[in-house]
Image (spheres, rainbow, N blue to C red):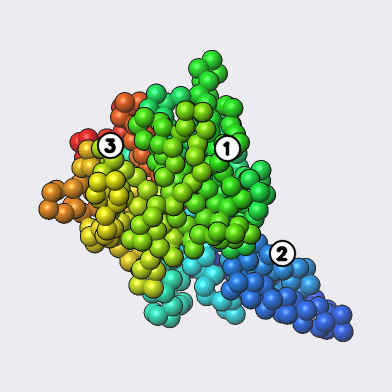
Amino acid sequence: MKIVLSLLFVLAAYGSDVLAMNNRAVPPDSVTGIIDRSAALLLIDQGKQMIADGKVRDALIIFREAALKDQMTWKAPFWIAYCHYRLNNFGYARQYGEEAIRKGGTDVDNDVYEILGSSYHRIGSLDSAAMYYETALAKLSKSRARELGIQKKLDECNYAEEAMKKQQNLRVSMRGEVNSGFNEYAPILSQDGKLLYFTSRRGNTTGGRVNPDDQEYFEDIYSAQWNNATQQWDSVSNKIERLNTDGFDAMSWLYPDGLRAITTYNNNATEAKKQTKSSDICEVEFTTKGKWTAAKPIANKSINTSFFEGAATVTADGNTMYFVSDRKGEKRSTEIYVVQRQGKKWGVAQALSDSVNTAGRETTPYITPDGRFLFFSSDGHTGMGGMDVYVCENTGTGWSSAINLGAAVNSVNDDTHFVIYKQLNKAVMAGFNLQGQKSSMDMYEIDLSKLVLPVKL
């Protein structure tokens, strides 16, 4: 990969900054200055503890206070950059990471080069990303570089650059009121394409609760209607009686008849008397009274456990279900499982082979109606960065190797919830939308007539 900005140039620029600082008059320490610097260090320690507790947004506020207390420290902008990256504010992460280098020089925590590499990677500046990844490899210990996955990320940069030379991204943002600036994902269409269900974490979530882990609003299921006159989605609402609760609610599958669906339900962060142990897979039905039934977890201990389960997809005959679980979290991240229906009940769920599952994350599976092809997202297979969409074929004796769908579908960020509607000649999915210094998950459509898939449906 061609490196636009050489490390030599960076070091030379940094050297000029140091010379300028040395020639500048530095005021003598004062009691106020010493107190402020001490206060900044205490705030930074407080913020680091908040990160350990999963409160990244609160930590960001604390690190900003530290930066005001001591405007010369590199530590505050370093941790501000770290928080912004965790919050998907990639532009701000790049800005504060570079500020940390300017202020810290050789004293800066070398992890900053990984933050900068990843930030430039996520905004699509692959040459700059590669430069910082290579700097990280040179400066970090081998064990720390392995822990941060630097070489893998550098390989993803190279893969992404080659992939984007071959294909142009085909996805188009869903029109209308469905993408809001909050995170929207899991688009599900009715068979005629006139009704859309999706999941969002908007501020009007039922119950108004905020997740203490990531400090975002709880998930709700939303519906929208296609307006032929305006050619966009409107009538967006989460007022779907019984489907949405004070907990987390998401829909992952709508049967072709539109009268049955599979949802994911989690109420263990609420005051509900009967709580789920984690996220459970549920089956719901649309009644003759025009209402959905309340979500009821599937009574099968191999499907719903005390761990996370969700993102279920089912074959057209309704007899085979694929879903995601993190029940092997100590050794692996999320994996895809399959379970067969036996009469009126489900059988014993089994993890798919290593053709699909890796030590990384596999999620949001979609099985074609005939059960032949499995599309899913993963960060464990070779990809462009973040989670890419892949496809495997059921050969009858097992699953083929995963094939990346390429830059026509994938980006350098997380790409998920890919579903094909052959009768509508379109696919839908979710991916990041970069807006200035920030980003959020949006929903997209792809014209199937323009998409060349690596398999023939």
In-front residue for pair 104/404: 404
CA gap between label 2 and label 3 equals 49 Å
**Which residue is painted at 71% across and 64% down in the image?**
61
Of mark 3 and mark 1, the one earlier in the sequence is 1
The amino acid pointed to by label 2 is Ile
Residue drawn 55% across the image and 52% down it: 248
Residue drawn at the location 41% of the way across and 39% of the way down: 261
Q: Mark 1 points at which residue?
A: 241
Residue annotated with mark 2? 61
Q: Is 4 displayed left or right of 345 in the figure?
A: right
Q: What element carries label 3?
A: loop
Residue in front for this viewpoint, 118 or 139: 118
- Amino acid type for the residue under numbered disc 3: Ala
Q: Mark 3 = which residue?
A: 316
Amino acid, disc 1: Glu
Mark 2 in CB contact with mark 3 (< 8 angstroms):
no
Measured as percent of width and height from the top left, residue 346 is found at 29, 51
